Image (cartoon, rainbow, N blue to C red):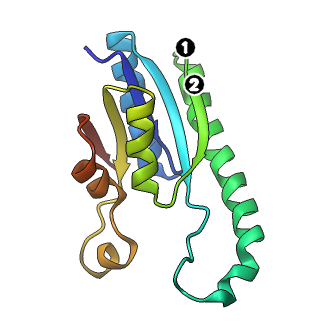
Amino acid sequence: MFKHILVPVDGSNTSQTAVGKAISLAKAFGSQVTVIYVIDPYPFTGVGTDFAYGQAEYLSAATAEAHAAVKSAKDAFAIAVVDVDSSVIESHSVWRGIVEAGSSLEADLIVMGSHGRSGLEKLVLGSVAQAVLSHTKLPVLVVRD
């Protein structure tokens, strides 16, 4: 049923739960799996030039975090004996990177975690899962911890 599953990760426990669901689906359907981590290279756009001085440090930390999250996901797939491809990509918004990756990789399912934010926290931090659901034509399995 699902030939190619895209699994965006962010290193959180919820993300690891989504990895577990993706493992189960990949085993059931013999699916190809791609794990991605999306880095927003310009997270401070529009908030002033004072933040530009920390850009290199931010990118270095974000890249290290991305590789750690991808490695953790790949390790889980390896333990389950499921082949997985992975990549760290850059996009001006995380949700856009996920949607574009799903399209370019010709995935037919996105399995991702949602932190379940609400109220002011959702307003300030946004909801990547909600934005992906709103902008993709692919089926999305949203996993909550």
**Residue at 69% from the left image edge and 53% from the top image edge:** 63
Q: Quadrant of residue 126?
A: bottom left
Q: Quadrant location of the N terminus? A: top left
Q: Quadrant of residue 25?
A: top left
Secondary element at tag 2: strand
Q: CA distance from mark 1 to mark 2?
A: 13 Å
Q: Quadrant of residue 52?
A: bottom right
Is 95 above or below relative to 56? Answer: above
List x then y, in percent, for residue 90: 58, 51
Which residue is labeled 1 in the image? 81
Is 144 above or below relative to 7? Answer: below
Which residue is labeled 2 in the image? 85
List x then y, in percent, for residue 89: 58, 45
How many numbered markers are drawn? 2
In this picture, residue 91 sits left or right of residue 135 = right
The mark lying in front, picked from 1 and 2, is: 2
Q: Residues within 10 Å of mark 1 (few under 14, many from 20)?
A: few
Is 103 above or below relative to 83? Answer: below
Q: Nearer the viewer, residue 120 or 75?
A: 120
Amino acid tagged 1 = Val
List x then y, in percent, for residue 7: 44, 36
Q: Residues within 10 Å of mark 2 (few under 14, many from 20)?
A: few
Secondary element at tag 1: loop
Amino acid tagged 2 = Asp
In this picture, residue 18 sits left or right of residue 139 = right
